[in-house]
Amino acid sequence: KNEVEQSPQNLTAQEGEFITINCSYSVGISALHWLQQHPGGGIVSLFMLSSGKKKHGRLIATINIQEKHSSLHITASHPRDSAVYICAVRSQGNFNKFYFGSGTKLNVKP
Amino acid sequence: DAGVIQSPRHEVTEMGQEVTLRCKPISGHNSLFWYRQTMMRGLELLIYFNNNVPIDDSGMPEDRFSAKMPNASFSTLKIQPSEPRDSAVYFCASSFHLATQYFGPGTRLTVL
């Protein structure tokens, strides 16, 4: 069983649609990261959060620690949002291990 | 700052050869991460350092892989001997105290 599960694996949307990507995890965490990898291969860290909600432009990330669940929302999606979105968690405790989801491939059509 | 710098950007080598990948983290960052990405396995964390000390190397696939961080501004990932299954993109990332990670552009390794 994977410690981090993402859904959906693939997502196709029309430009302008509201998009939600989900991440569930099974370990106690210190922090959760959302990463974005563009088709060219570069990886960017979008958010790091341990509680509540963060917003950056059209992107919103939320986390519910009790339910061990996080969502990444994209409002007014645009073709340039097409990328793979990866959820990663850092576990609690001395070892601070990292676990990664398998990614959600998003394609936004014009 | 120039961001995380990795070299080389591309490496093609023959099976059995030694490969050394290099990373210069962002100045002031004290955590450094080495990742491997393949189509089959996705993004995997190989090892990370905090204050130049390896913290978790459980992702290092086998003894052929080794990583060092001799000082705060330089790290290497070495594969000896290399095998075709090591072909992947290797990313280095750095952060300040395990906070937001900044990724380098990656090294695309092909082992023939």
Image (spheres, coloured by chain):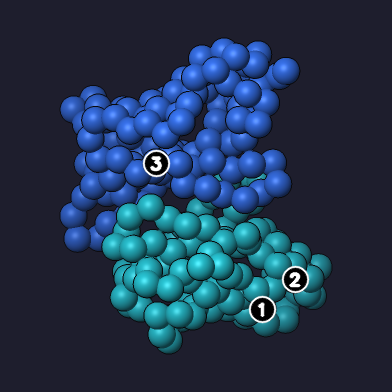
Callout 2: chain: B
Residue B19 marker: 1
Label 2 and label 1 in one chain: yes
Say if residue A91 shows up in the picture.
yes
Above or below, A72 relative to B97: above
> Which residue sits furthest bottom?
B70
Label 1 and label 3 in one chain: no
> Which amino acid type is shown beneath numbered disc 2?
Glu
In the image, residue A42 lies at what x, y percent? 62, 50
Secondary structure under the numbered disc 2 in the rendered image: strand
In front of the other: A48 or B50: A48
> Which amino acid type is shown beneath numbered disc 1?
Val
Q: Colour of chain B?
A: cyan
Q: CA distance from mark 2 to mark 1?
A: 8 Å
In the image, residue B24 lies at what x, y percent? 52, 75
Callout 1: chain: B
Q: State if disc 1 and disc 2 touch (CB < 8 Å).
A: yes
Q: CA distance from mark 3 to mark 2?
A: 31 Å
Residue A108 marker: none
Q: CA distance from mark 1 to mark 3?
A: 33 Å
Mark 3 against mark 2, which lies toward the viewer? Answer: 3
User: Residue B12 is drawn in which quadrant?
Assistant: bottom right
Q: Colour of chain A?
A: blue
Q: Which residue is mark 2?
A: B11
Q: Quadrant where the C terminus of chain B lies?
A: bottom right
Label 3 and label 2 in one chain: no
